Image (cartoon, rainbow, N blue to C red):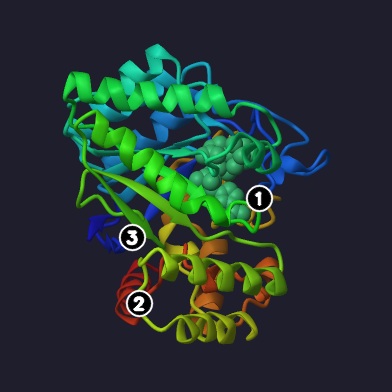
Amino acid sequence: MNGNGNGHAVPSFEGSYIVFELTNLCNLRCKHCIQQYDIHPHTDDGGFLDPAIFYAALEDMERHGLTFHTLILFWIGEPLMHPKFAELYRFVLEFNARAKVFRKVEVHTNGNLLRPAVRDLATNDTDSIFQVWHCTIDAARPDTYVGIKGKNDFALVEANVRELVKLRAEKRSLYPKLVFQFIVHESNAAEAPDFLARWRGECESQGLDCGVAAFHPVFDRDNCVFFRQLDCLDAAEQEASNTRYVELMRSLGLVGEDRRSIVERLRSKILTPNTHTCSGFFKSPVVNWDGRVTTCTRDNEMVNVLGDLRSETFHDVWWRNQKLAAWRQQAIDGSYRDLSICQDCIIPKSANYTNMTKAEVKAYRRWSSRAV
Ligand SMILES: C[S@@+](CC[C@H](N)C(=O)[O-])C[C@H]1O[C@@H](n2cnc3c(N)ncnc32)[C@H](O)[C@@H]1O
Ligand code: SF4
């Protein structure tokens, strides 16, 4: 529990994370991403997060004793495109050594801009925070890569990631833990075994250990090849994606449970309306590149805007906000009356989702009854 500045402790939740979108711009057009659309409200206007907003938000968290398990330095765009990426990343390492607000920092990159200076920055021994970098490659063959990512950068990306592995081995650095990520599509599923062999082999040839995981990455073997479930925009597509995913994970020996029972469980969740207490309202503030804050990474049109870090403090937006208090109550009730995008949301039914437990709801209720 952390202090909220009013003498009442705010709850800290398991699996909490905060997202800062360093930029909404990207140099690829992946088929699974909204960047593929020529026109979309999230990308109609583009820009870079003002470092002053980022530094002020983190210092505000320190001042109020707020903590999040994970600091996520991207949302829809490519974070390495931020012109001050290195400065922001160094700030996180130094800040957290003192403030201990986060336990983990995550960077996901398409690998396009993993140039020597960035590779040098990433490979470090700063143990103030667990550092994870996902390289989202999604293919083992150049033609499949172009079909999914929209650009013929396969050779460049493979070379950049290979150099990152090599540098980490040469420097014998503690970090980053590397995740070689592969989102399972219909078009790439057949090459998953090659992808696993490719990146595990690359690590082993450099003397680094590398495991493999489904559903969530694991770091019991230092680095990890991670097969990620594809999140879709509608229930029918999601169901097909789940079936394909579980089938493939089973063939790779990554799920032990009966295939049908997992698919059935996921299906029964998808076809029912959303009555879950969505954890987004409690665990995962998302800061758009311009400073506006919402409750969920699915809200890429900024429908559920709670506040704006250009004019408000983070603590006020997340812990002293009447609009959010009312929305949290709706989430607890599972009603989502005023939250149209949440009514039929399929994210709480995805493998990529973090739950909200009954004990956590109780802890929140206890805090809110005292904080009024
Ligand atoms: C939008 S990307 C931004 C970061 C960076 N450009 C990248 O591609 O890694 C953030 C993360 O979401 C994942 N992602 C994007 N669309 C997805 C989808 N439909 N289903 C599952 N994961 C998705 C990406 O693979 C990446 O790990
Ligand atoms: S690289 Fe990342 S942000 Fe860019 S299109 Fe692909 S998933 Fe989206």
Quadrant where the C terminus sits is: bottom left
x%, y% of residue 184?
55, 56
Q: Residues within 10 Å of mark 1 (few under 14, many from 20)?
A: some
The image shows residue 268, relative to residue 126, as above or below, that is: below
Q: Nearer the viewer, residue 91 or 132?
A: 132
- In the rendered image, which residue does mark 3 sit on? 15
Sequence-first disc among 3 and 2: 3
Q: Amino acid at mark 2?
A: Thr
Q: Amino acid at mark 3?
A: Gly
Residue 32's label in the rendered image is: 1
Quadrant where the N terminus sits is: bottom left
**Residue at the spot 61% in from the left edge and 71% down from the top edge:** 346
x%, y% of residue 77?
60, 35
Q: Secondary structure at mark 3?
A: loop
The image shows residue 183, relative to residue 98, as above or below, that is: below
- In the rendered image, which residue does mark 2 sit on? 357
Tell whether 224 sits left or right of 297: left
* Camera-nearest label, 1 or 3: 1
The image shows residue 253, relative to residue 47, as above or below, that is: below
x%, y% of residue 150?
71, 36
**Residue at the spot 22% in from the left edge and 25% down from the top edge:** 169
Q: Nearer the viewer, residue 230 or 85?
A: 230
Q: Amino acid at mark 1?
A: His
